[in-house]
Image (spheres, coloured by chain):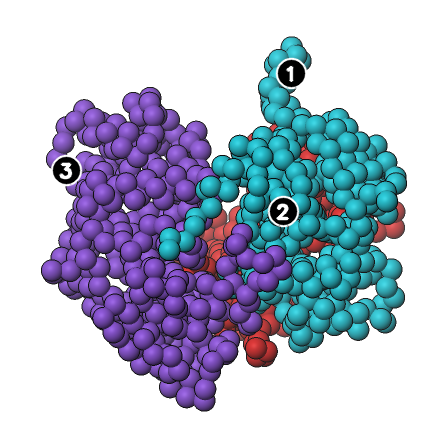
Chain colours: A cyan, B red, C purple
Amino acid sequence: MTPLLHLEGVSKTYQLEDRWLARLRGRTRRLAAVSGVDLAVRRGDVLGIVGESGCGKSTLARMILRMETPTAGRITFDGQDITPLSGAALVPVRKRMQMVFQDPGGSLNPRKTVRRVLGESLGLAGVERERRAEAAAKLLERVGLNADQLDRYPHELSGGQRQRVAIARALAMNPDLIVADEPVSALDVSLQAQIIRLLMQLRDELGLTLVFISHDLALVHHLCNDLVVMQAGRIVERGPPREVLHQPAHPYTRLLLEAIPRVRN
Amino acid sequence: MSDTVRRPGTLSALLRRPAGLVGGALVTAVVLAALLAPWIAPADPIAVDLAAKLQPPGVVHWLGTDQTGRDLLSRILWGARPSLSVGVVAVLIGLLGGCGIGLTAGYYRGIWAQLSMRVMDGFASIPLLIWAIAVIGIVGVGPVQIGAVQFPNEAKLALLIGLFYMPPLARVTYGSALGEAASDYVRARQSQGAGDLTILFGDVLPNCLSPVIVQATLLVAVGIVVEASLSFIGLGVEPPNPSWGSMLADARGFVFTGQWWMSVGPGAAISASVIGFNLLGDALRDALDPRRSVGSPAISGLLG
Amino acid sequence: MALLEVRDLCVGFPVNGRMLEVVRGVSFTLEPGEALGLVGESGSGKSQTALAILRLLKRPGRIVSGSVRFEGSELTQLDEVAMTRLRGAGMSIIFQDAMASLNPAFTIGTQLTDAIRAHRTLSRSAARDAAVDALTRVGIRDAGARLAQFPHQFSGGMRQRALIAMAIACQPRLLVADEPTTALDVTVQAQIVSLLAELRRELGLALLFITHNLDLMAQICDRALVMYGGLVLEEAPVGPLFASPRQPYTEALIGCVPRLSDVPGQLGVIEGAPPIAGRMGPGCPFEPRCQHRIERCAAERPPEMATADRRVTCWVRAA
């Protein structure tokens, strides 16, 4: 079965030198944020990308969504090479991939009510104006909120509720793929569990394809059926969580696992 | 847990603050004076009556008369017009240009941002008053004819000042736009396929408004002072039309001869307008922020 | 004598004429050299408790009632001068965001020596030596060279180490750590926690460790307080707390922490959301989300029941 998302040799290198004179003389410092990543995500997969800060996982996420252009390699989405695309050509592809961000505070416009946020998204997804209110209420229900949250502003909602709205917004586009970049890291433990359970439900009910980025290995253990470990821009280990997390092959993976606080008994 | 959230309207939030009340009252007074001058002014502001010249405030002329017998109260009321119109029109011109430049610079960045911001910096380095005096001095004082419509001299002032308002407004907008354009919710909209213009006006601009509004109200106050200054030296409103600035110029010769009412009236009018707009700007900024709703823990920032 | 004794501490913020209470009657004791964990989620009041102890509450917040005794002296009565002398020398605090706690315009060396000289009369060079000493002790190599660097030149973990160095430079008896590792990577987190454990041993430091991460707290603390809605719902030694939690909230919280040892997909969940200060009923703050609630729970605040090593605040479950 052809994968929904396929990354081959994808790299992203940043030029660090800001002073144009130095650049002119060819002296630049380069930062390889991502190097040579090969990845395949099939429909219905939940892929976990784990690593510590600076490993390149967020850059990788942005490249998958084509918010950044890879400096090398190829990204194929549903059979189409999306690497060279830009501007208007990218719009129909982008609509099929949605993102859920880490910070529930920043991912919703503080001046827009939930109703407006969802309404606009539904509009862009092609839903007619008359049907939007109903569709928005259904979306909220699906993520575990009730319709009277529609007229709230983001700051009137708790962190967990905001994150649910962000998920609802992503679902409004009826995407083929959702990329979630540390979606629960900023939440309390009890709310984290709720959102993870919601994602598990959406995975089971909707057959959602999900790329789940996290630094928390235990979450990946619960949610994902496939996993890659990143370090300094490269993938150092991959496989199903039950293998990678319980019989790690790479020393870095072992390091991560050892650092997890274990309850003394 | 669905409890109804009391979200007070902007107006009540405005009036709840002393700055809003006082500022609002002063600005309303000035605006009303300007709008209703033809009906509430007791006398014709340019009617000369040499028999009644230099009269102190009294029953007939509530604020006294000037050296040609014109009623000062009427002149002050009518004088609100040029002050306000120059102040407001200049700000509108500045907003149009400045916000447009700032928004696009902050959103698209790159060469355009660098270029436009450097040009704005260049403009900002020229003192407004000097520039205005120079340009009007060259172009000359007098009405402007565009097609069938004749604009008074103040129109030149408004345009000049408006051009000079673009740099500060552009800079303020640029600063906010930079931050907002990089935020997650803008990226979310982009990923949903929303067009750039929609995002600029629907998402970025509303969140940049707060500092822009404060700046804009301050600039109205500046405009009033600049108009008064230029009229004071004869480059603004042409006599005999009343302007607080030219009234102060007339009063100059009579300060030491005891006709205090000639300078106190227009001086107070200028001060009241400037203070009013400043206070209003401060209060508006606070009232417009939807994050500061009363009833929900405004202390959530403190609790962390 | 106990190092720190907190009795019925209440902290509130006056808002619009009402007093919003965020800490509603917290009591605990800390012995010298002991490590106590303060566990809770947002709105539990744990951070406000810590700030209240050091009298660092952000205005208009203040201690409404209760007593805080440090080495015998009543801190709520102390004036600001005496309090300033105590902070840094008697007790110290480190916060979550190391970058925000450090002044970006000054070198680490300046900030460290300033902290040292504030409490000890030392010449500049002696203070510098003490600073090098402190940095080395917290595991920063090349301490001498590092003194000349600015905070942004340090990594996140090193900044936190530098903060710890500042906090212990004058050898306080109590260190309060408010979520010190939340912003750090898991490997760095482990290092910081073992550093704190080491320092405890070396200096006989008592530690009040505030966190929402139960498992992390268990690495370093002997006892734990579980806070929710401004109250202490349970207190127990760490081992028994995890082995047999009595309070329904503690039990549920332990259950919803994801662990590698869980069966994949089976994650405990607590429905609902944490309470908001000022919007809680007269009864137990956890009642709306509790599986074991009875009618009394919503109506009356549950009493605290204590046994030899435990305290439980609940109507349904006893210690």
Mark 2 in CB contact with mark 1 (< 8 angstroms):
no
Up/down of A94 relative to B23, above or below: above
| Residue at numbered disc 1 | A23
The residue tagged 2 is: A241
Mark 3, Cα crowd under 10 Å, few <14 / some 14-19 / many 20+, is few
Crowd rating for badge 2 (residues with CA inside 10 Å; few <14, some 14–19, many 20+): many
Q: Is residue B124 left or right of residue C163?
A: right
Callout 1: chain: A
Q: Give the mark nearer the N terminus: 2 vs 1.
A: 1
Dot 3 amino acid type? Arg
Specify the subunit that label 2 lies on.
A
Closer mark to the observer between disc 3 and disc 2:
2
Q: CB of mark 1 within 8 Å of CB of mark 3?
A: no
Q: In this view of the protein, which residue sits in the foreground, B255 or B280?
A: B280
Expressed as whole percent of the image width and height from the top left, the position of residue C39 reads: 38, 60
Report whether mark 1 lies on the same chain as mark 3: no
Does residue B174 show up? Answer: no
In the rendering, at what x and y percent does residue C145 appear? 33, 21
Question: Is label 2 or label 1 in front?
Answer: 2
- Chain letter for the residue marked with disc 3 in the picture: C
> How far apart are the two marked residues, 2 and 1, measured between alpha carbons?
44 Å
Residue at the spot of label 3: C120
Secondary-structure class at tag 1: helix
Q: Residue at x 72, y 59 (%)?
A: A203
